[in-house]
Amino acid sequence: MSSKPTLRDRSRDNQADISETQQRDLPEGERPHADAEMTRVLKTAPLRKASDPSTGVITYWRHDPLHDVVKPMADHVLMAFPAEPVRFERRDGKAFVNGMTRPGTVTVIPAGSSSRWDIFQPLSVVQLYLPQATLKRVAHEAGTASPGDLVERTAHSDPITARLLLSAADALEGSAALDTLFRHQLTDLLATRVLAAHAGSPVAPQPVIGGLSPTVLRRAIERLRSDSDADVSLAALASDAGLSRFHFCRAFKESTGLSPHAWLRQHQLEQAMTMLRDTDDSIVSIAAALGYSSQTAFAAAFKKLTDETPSDWRRRMR
């Protein structure tokens, strides 16, 4: 079978499962949100989920074979596939798509779209649910015109977007502050990517020139370093700097060489190393002090950056 989905015209096929009229039957204000509709269709709960009303929802699923109609949703849905290829078919009133899910491909279901899906084996998938308001905000902050309608994509080759979305799965557990900041950055970046690559009228963000002023940069770093319950969300950092989220991220990286999330991750790693080297605190206590949800999550994050477990690093440094 070809690695690319095959598409054929079904506009005159009396066996088509869903008509264009049926797709539009549900008023926009009454459409279910994507997380509720996907839970109904997949007949299970996501293995991991992170939700932010101001940005969107990221979910990681492992579901059984699927044979059902996905109804029109209030949100745009972006999917990427981390594992084995799985055969699928998608039908709507106009087209029939037959192909394989593969790493490096994405599926885009625009808000309001509806089609029947047949997926013939268990499937792992990471999904991002983007409200239209998020796309409009990102387009506005990037200095572009209002976004056009998204283009429906099915197992469409887009390694950049797929890699970005799959990285979100790593931010669904761990350090609350770190992961929240990462999700905010990643969601905005994915929205920018969707507007550039999957909109009917692609938009190109205007380049950002120059970094943050010394005073604004110092305030941002003080907030990120704070050991209190200071709000280190992207929205709070940007508001404190008097910038949009889009421009704050780019200006911060221009000034420091790192994104806000990467800077905070590096700062937490330095804190962890200091505590491991200079104190006798348990690994569990250090994990809790740094805001990690568990010792396992802390150890996984530490090893990802150092190639050593916290215990091994501590023994080597003493």
Image (cartoon, rainbow, N blue to C red):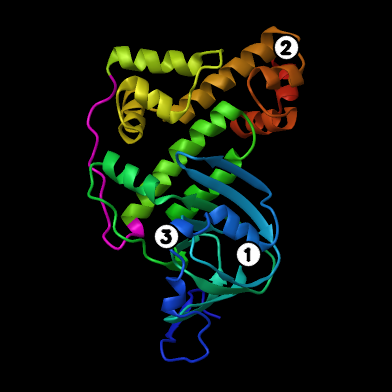
- Residue tagged 2: 318
As drawn, the label of residue 41 is 1
Taking the magenta stretch, the answer to whether it contains residue 200 is yes
Residue under the image location 33 percent in, 59 percent down: 199
Q: Say whether residue 101 is left or right of residue 292.
A: left
Looking at the image, do the residues carrying marks 1 and 2 touch, with CB atoms under 8 Å apart? no
Q: Is residue 88 left or right of residue 108?
A: right
Q: Residues within 10 Å of mark 3 (few under 14, many from 20)?
A: few
> From the viewer's perspective, is 122 left or right of 90?
right
Mark 1 or 2 closer to N-term? 1
Query: Which segment is the magenta one?
Result: 197-212
Q: Residue at the location (51% across, 13% down)?
A: 226
Q: CA distance from mark 2 to mark 3?
A: 62 Å
Inspect the image, locate mark 3, and give the three-letter code of the amino acid beneath it.
Glu
* Residue type, label 1: Val
- The secondary structure type at the circle numbered 3 is helix
Q: Which of the two labelled residues, at mark 2 and mark 3, occupies the earlier sequence position?
A: 3
Mark number, residue 28: 3
